Image (cartoon, rainbow, N blue to C red):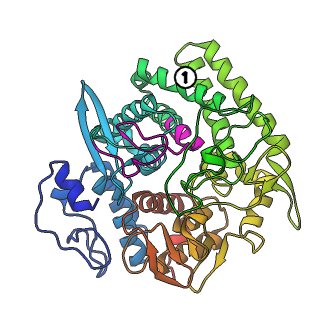
């Protein structure tokens, strides 16, 4: 669905739109930056407005020496709020549905990531706080509808674009790709919202029911008896769009790890034990253990979650790492428990590169540091060198396209100002004059890109710039040439 139609469907006033040839967004003439015209929608057509976010834009722009970076930041950072939010009160509670961009469905993963950079502002902006609280409520509804689904519709009468999938999606489900990280992101958002706000009203009966269902689904997908109720088949020519063996995936030896039939890219896994997603699950279960012990006074479920996290941690130590020629002991990307391993990475989060983003303590982990060196080398089959950029590719976009998200995550997990500068320069040089990030661009031609409207990548770029201004201000206090 195009942005214009999404706004129309959500009852917002439409005015005349001037659409630049390079994107699906309306230009306006607010906050001019040294000759650059903002590509944000006009104020009357933005799907949500936050005064705290607007103040942040002005504050950060004042600290950016490069006018094009300032322009990119203004376009990208508020893009989720500007174009993807459907907020209302349902049954007396905030409810927020956030589409991913040019696909009018809400991913559990993307929706959390899209609002993540705004969370530090919730205590100074009550409408923003309620909007994110509404997303927590909506995600709970999604989990209770189908814990195996990754993407959802708000309109329960809408027929899925993937209605021929087997099993057929239930009303309200866009697609049913089982990805561990989808459920982890639900926990991640609730945990961080509570940490920052102290608002425990989100932990209601439905939330509790959803969290127990998440833990139960993780347990089921350990497949300790070798079986699972989950399968997924799709009528497609894309070999990565469904698991092999009639939608059940390759054989595994039970290890205590959780099977994930899909990666965060929505591509089918090669081997079902996806290591970065299992690490994410361990982190999420520990967060649940803390909430249930310290806030909800349920030591029994807290202990269950902690024991489950410990079980995954022990299995990761045994199966999640291996020796690699030239790099020593590093994290594998996927394993099967039989000793088979895949050494690579994907650009989406969770990825091996993003571990230090999800949990900062990984930054000093020797195994992570060695893994990072591998990921940025020609030993990684999905690391590409191009004319204007280098970075992480993905089977999702083919053999020749680099993901801006991968470049952003490289910068966000680096403490080296020169590396951070290099990453930002690549992002500046590869947005194809659009003023926005994309899903992927051809390594030798940034004008050959995927997805002109990809809100997660846009907002993540904004998060990067805020982080660099805070931690390495000298990097952005000079032109990026």
Quarter of the figure with residue 384: bottom right
Q: Is residue 429 left or right of residue 245?
A: left
Residue 100, position as x, y percentages in the image: 39, 54
**Is residue 145 placed above or below 2 in the rendered structure?**
above
Residue 331 can be seen, yes or no: no
Please name whichever residue, 114 or 268, is drawn nearer the observer in this view of the structure: 268
Residue 265, position as x, y percentages in the image: 55, 56
Quarter of the image containing the N terminus?
bottom left
Quarter of the figure with residue 328: bottom right
| Circle count | 1
Please name whichever residue, 177 or 419, is drawn nearer the observer in this view of the structure: 177
Residue at 78 percent of width and 35 percent of height: 254
Residue under pointer 1 = 212
Residue at 24 percent of width and 55 percent of height: 6
Q: Is residue 167 left or right of residue 367?
A: left
Residue 270, position as x, y percentages in the image: 69, 54
Look at the image and say whether residue 326 sits in the magenta stretch: no
Residue at 60 percent of width and 46 percent of height: 247
Quarter of the figure with residue 193: top left
Residue 340 can be seen, yes or no: yes
SS type, badge 1: helix
Look at the image and say whether residue 168 sits in the magenta stretch: yes
Stretch of the chain drawn in magenta = 158-186
**Is residue 199 placed above or below 4 in the rendered structure?**
above
Please name whichever residue, 301 or 3, is drawn nearer the observer in this view of the structure: 3
Q: Main secondary structure of the magenta part?
A: loop
Residue at 62 percent of width and 24 percent of height: 289
Please name whichever residue, 183 or 68, is drawn nearer the observer in this view of the structure: 183
Q: In this view, does 106 lie to the left or right of 261?
A: left
Residue 250, position as x, y percentages in the image: 71, 47
Q: Estimate how packed mark 1 is, as few (under 14), some (14 to 19) or many (20 or more) residues with alpha carbons within 10 Å.
A: some
């Amino acid at each position: 669905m195009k942005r214009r139609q999404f706004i129309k469907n959500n009852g917002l006033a439409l005015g005349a739109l001037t659409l630049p040839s390079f994107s699906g967004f309306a230009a306006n003439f607010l906050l001019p930056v040294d000759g650059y015209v903002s590509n944000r929608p006009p104020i009357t057509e933005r799907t949500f407005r936050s005064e705290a976010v607007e103040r942040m834009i002005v504050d950060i722009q004042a600290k950016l020496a490069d006018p094009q970076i300032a322009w990119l930041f203004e376009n990208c950072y508020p893009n989720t709020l500007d174009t993807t939010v459907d907020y209302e009160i349902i049954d007396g509670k905030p409810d927020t549905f956030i589409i991913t961009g040019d696909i009018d469905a809400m991913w559990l993963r993307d929706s959390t990531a899209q609002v993540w950079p705004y969370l530090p502002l919730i205590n100074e902006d009550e409408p923003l706080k309620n909007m994110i609280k509404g997303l927590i409520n909506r995600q709970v509804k999604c989990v209770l509808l189908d814990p195996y689904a990754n993407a959802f519709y708000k309109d329960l009468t809408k027929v899925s674009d993937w209605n021929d999938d087997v099993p057929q999606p239930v009303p309200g489900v866009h697609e049913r790709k089982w990805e561990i990280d989808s459920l982890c992101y639900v926990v991640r958002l609730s945990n961080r919202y509570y940490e920052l706000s102290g608002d425990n009203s989100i932990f209601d009966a439905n939330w509790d029911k959803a969290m127990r269902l998440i833990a139960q689904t993780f347990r089921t997908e350990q497949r300790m008896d070798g079986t699972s109720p989950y399968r997924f088949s799709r009528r497609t020519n894309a070999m990565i769009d469904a698991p092999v063996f009639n939608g059940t995936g390759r054989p595994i030896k039970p290890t205590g790890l959780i099977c994930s039939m899909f990666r965060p890219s929505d591509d089918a896994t090669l081997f079902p034990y996806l290591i970065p997603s299992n690490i994410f699950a361990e982190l999420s279960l520990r967060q649940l253990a803390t909430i249930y012990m310290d806030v909800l006074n349920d030591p029994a479920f807290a202990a269950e979650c902690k024991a489950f996290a410990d079980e995954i941690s022990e299995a990761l130590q045994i199966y999640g790492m291996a020796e690699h020629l030239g790099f020593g002991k590093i994290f594998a990307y996927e394993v099967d428990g039989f000793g088979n391993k895949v050494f690579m990475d994907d650009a989406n989060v969770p990825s091996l590169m993003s571990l230090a983003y999800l949990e900062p303590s990984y930054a000093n982990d020797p195994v992570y540091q060695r893994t990072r060196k591998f990921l940025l080398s020609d030993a990684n089959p999905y690391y590409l060198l191009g004319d204007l950029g280098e970075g992480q590719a993905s089977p999702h976009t083919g053999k020749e396209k680099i993901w801006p998200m991968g470049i952003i995550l490289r910068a966000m997990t680096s403490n080296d100002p020169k590396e951070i500068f290099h990453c930002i320069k690549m992002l500046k040089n590869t947005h194809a004059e659009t003023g926005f990030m994309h899903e992927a661009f051809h390594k030798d031609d940034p004008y050959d890109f995927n997805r002109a409207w990809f809100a997660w990548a846009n907002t993540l770029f904004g998060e990067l710039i805020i982080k660099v201004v805070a931690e390495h201000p000298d990097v952005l206090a000079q032109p990026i040439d």
